[in-house]
Image (cartoon, rainbow, N blue to C red):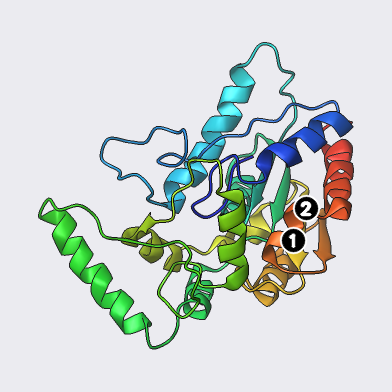
Amino acid sequence: MTHGFSGVKENSLPGIAEYFTESLVIACLVYDHRGFGDSNNQPTQPRQEILPAYQVSDYSDAVTYLQMRSDINSNKIGIWGSSYSGGHVLCVGAIDRRVSAVISQVPLVDGWETFHRLIRPDFVPLVNELIQKDRLAVAAGEEPAVLPVVDENPLKQSALPTSDSYQYFTDCGQGTNWKNFITLKSLEALRGYIPAAYMEHISPTPLLLVVAENDQVTPTDLALKAYSKALEPKSLHIISGGHFDVYTAQQNLELQADFLRSHICS
């Protein structure tokens, strides 16, 4: 288990992991993506930079770590991801055949479409120009450009310009080492990331997809379209509310625990 876009492991994940470990005979590994929270990162990669290929690879490294633990029965390992990491687990589930089950919660499935829905159309040319300038500046040895993850004013430029994103990170970021910025390159990487391309390759690994019916961050229709491409065995759970409501919905946790009980604990 690891966090979504720009988050840290303390953002909602401990409560979910605790629910799983109390409800099931299961161990949960919760970690920070490289460059975020308590995690180290590669010497050549700036802090607060979100590169999907690295984060996808790190999921498989986490699976390897669990397999190496002599105190854990790692015959069956499930992967759990939400939002940006919800897209990562779709990729890992298709690529890494050691994985026995995949839970993908309110996932990013199409970075191109999501980018162009989140970023105001009149801002897109400016973002393109800033990305080009940033590439030249970094190549010349300058520090990478950054932008806020959220802003109280949704009309100001930020990576996640929705009111529920601002509220979530304002609340969950308190008392943690979450930081309200990412590198500009992270936004460019988002636009080129399309986990939906892996959907039909996850089978025969069981997939549970959790979708919020009014998701403004990772749009509902994109997730449902991606789910239609997945092959059996697959399950879909649609909850009421928006993107961040899934973290506290009791019914959602119960359903996920049942899924894990069937595919990991049996």
Residue 110 location (% of width, % of height): 55, 69
Residue 196 left/right relative to 41: right
Q: Is residue 55 above or below residue 110?
A: above
Q: Is residue 59 above or below residue 72?
A: below
Residue 207 location (% of width, % of height): 76, 51
Q: Residue at x 61, y 54 (%)?
A: 171
The local crowd at label 2, few if under 14, some if 14 to 19, many if 20 or more residues have their Cα within 10 Å, is few
Q: Quadrant of residue 144?
A: bottom left
Q: Which residue has dot 1 on it?
A: 245
Residue 107: mark: none
Give the residue type at disc 2. Answer: Thr
**Quarter the N terminus occupies:** top right
Q: Is residue 14 above or below residue 210?
A: above
Q: Residue at x 43, y 69 (%)?
A: 158
Closer to the camera in the image, 108 or 184: 184
Q: Secondary structure at mark 1?
A: helix
Residue 21 left/right relative to 119: right
Q: Is residue 3 above or below residue 200?
A: above
Q: Secondary structure at mark 2?
A: loop
Residue 25 location (% of width, % of height): 85, 26
Closer to the camera in the image, 143 or 230: 143
Number of residue marks: 2
Gap between marks 2 and 1 measured at Cα: 6 Å
Give the residue type at disc 1. Answer: Asp
Q: Residue at x 83, y 40 (%)?
A: 260
* Residue 230 visible in image: yes
**Residue reaching furthest to the top:** 70
Residue 10 location (% of width, % of height): 60, 40
Q: Which residue has dot 2 on it?
A: 248
Q: Are marks 2 and 1 in contact (CB under 8 Å)?
A: yes
The local crowd at label 1, few if under 14, some if 14 to 19, many if 20 or more residues have their Cα within 10 Å, is some
